[in-house]
Amino acid sequence: MIVFRWNVQVLRLKHDRGASTRQIAQSCKLAQSTVTEYLYRAGAAGYSWPLPEALADEDLERELFPPRAQPGGPARPVPDWAEVRRELSRKGVTLLLLWREYKQAHPENGYGYARFASLFAEWERKSEVRMLQRHRAGEKLFVDYAGMTCQVTDAQTGELWDAQVFVAAMGSSQRLFAKACRGQDVESWLLAHVEAFEFYGAVPEVLVPDNLKAGVTSPCFYEPTLNAAYAELARHYELTVLPARVRKPRDKAKVENGVQQVERWVLAPLRDRTFLSLSELNEAIAEKVRELNARVMKGPRASRDDLFRSEDLPAMRPLPPVRYSYAQWKDAKVAPDYHVEFEGHKYSVPYALVGSRVELRIGAHVLEVYAGSKKVASHMRSLSRRGYTTLDAHMPESHKAGRWSGFRLTRWAAEIGPQAELFVQRVLESKSHQEHGFRTVLGVLGMEKKHGAERLEAACAKANAIGALRYASVKSILDKNLEASLLQPELPALPAHRNVRGADYYKTSEDLCAN
């Protein structure tokens, strides 16, 4: 039986038997990386199978694995590890590809792949900014709030309040952005994102936030539910939002490190300064952030600004032509008068949606109504906290059976009594559209269940007498039992007495005063 040494066996199994790298490694009891490197070295030297008969195994091994240079001899070329890290941030670039390019440049005395990889890992560990997670250029932007706050003094009252600090960090270059906000509410959170995108001048592919309520309604590793306004911002900028896992800080290590840098080099130096406005504080923060981003880091031997311009910015998408404008979202139910209410004012929707749940998108000037993903109504926002905004297109030509109408409501009121009927008629006549009075009428007539028809009829009589055509007025009359005192009793006539002057005296006095 012929016994082959392992180096010859590798070539025979590969080229003669067509075995895979894994199969060769198992057969020869070698690591797959060793097999891969050996086949690469043999291919680079032009050897396959069969080997030349005159070539001894020792000569083959010596040719493929030349002895290391002795002390005092020519040193092995050391790669520029910072450049290697920058190249790894580009799409499709791997450490094996970079080693092959390095080896082509130094075929005789370059490091083998295993040594090349171990030296790079050692350089990363010693680097001031650790690169435990590699991110593709322009791919991810990490966002969070800093733990430290900044005090702002109210210029008028002298009162102190704490401003929250929003921090963003690019995954590859680690370029930082920071902005002080009035709070951690949804509006502050979203507008800080907008300013961050404008600071970078471009948009990443992925946003990685923490699980705060302003961004994530329901934290879940598999299917997190985003706040409706945050989801709209993501759609506007065509972003993917991947919230970090709960209590997994390594998922957002970049921004955790960025927050630490901002607290150490931006917020701490400003701790003893007095700021009289949020804008004044943000000017000081922006200056400190500029200094921090321009500082050269020891590991990459480049600043965050330099890395951003060379790595992230070329791979990012341009900003959309229209700036995102903040809008509030709210759930609502369509009332029987086919209106939805926001801040006391009522806005119409198509009557077919009566009883349905809809979503309101409230912008600075426009209120929109969505049924599912379809926009069904759009109105200019009203500054009034009362009244109605109604489009004729939303009104039915005739109310279908089963829907409320002025005739049906009046007939219901007539069954209670003539005063209730009169009350309903007066309420409906006081509105530009009868439908605007449906809520008031339904509320009043519904009180029959609690107070009975007799008391409700008396309360309507009282309301008619004093001209109170509101639901709250009738409710107050019933709650305070005022319907019994419908009319004030006549006062008895004054007795005749010389000290009682009478109406003529006061009339004369008024005439005298008028003159």
Image (tube, grey):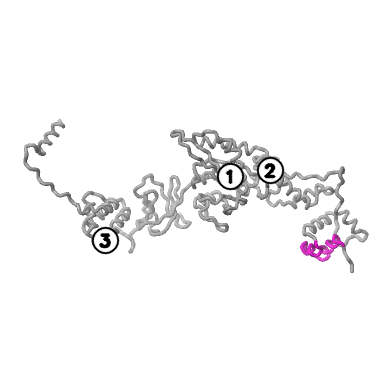
Q: Label 1 neighbourhood size at 10 Å, few (<14), some (14-19), many (20+)?
A: many
- Chain-order first, disc 2 or disc 1: 2
Q: Position of residue 249 (x, y in %)?
A: 60, 50
User: Front-most of 407 and 457?
Assistant: 457
Q: Nearer the viewer, residue 115 or 268?
A: 268
Q: Are marks 2 and 1 in contact (CB under 8 Å)?
A: no
Amino acid type, mark 1: Ala
Position of 136 compared to 386: left or right? right
Q: Mark 2 or mark 3, which is nearer the start of the sequence?
A: 2
Q: What residue is disc 2 on?
A: 128
**What type of secondary structure mainly makes up the magenta span?**
helix
Q: Earlier in the sequence, mark 3 or mark 1?
A: 1
Q: Secondary structure at mark 2?
A: loop
Q: Is residue 293 left or right of residue 405?
A: right
Q: Residues within 10 Å of mark 2 (few under 14, many from 20)?
A: few
Q: Residue drawn 51% across and 38% down?
A: 151
Give the residue number, with chain letter if any, for mark 1. Answer: 168
Is residue 426 among what the camera can see? no
- Label placed on residue 412: 3
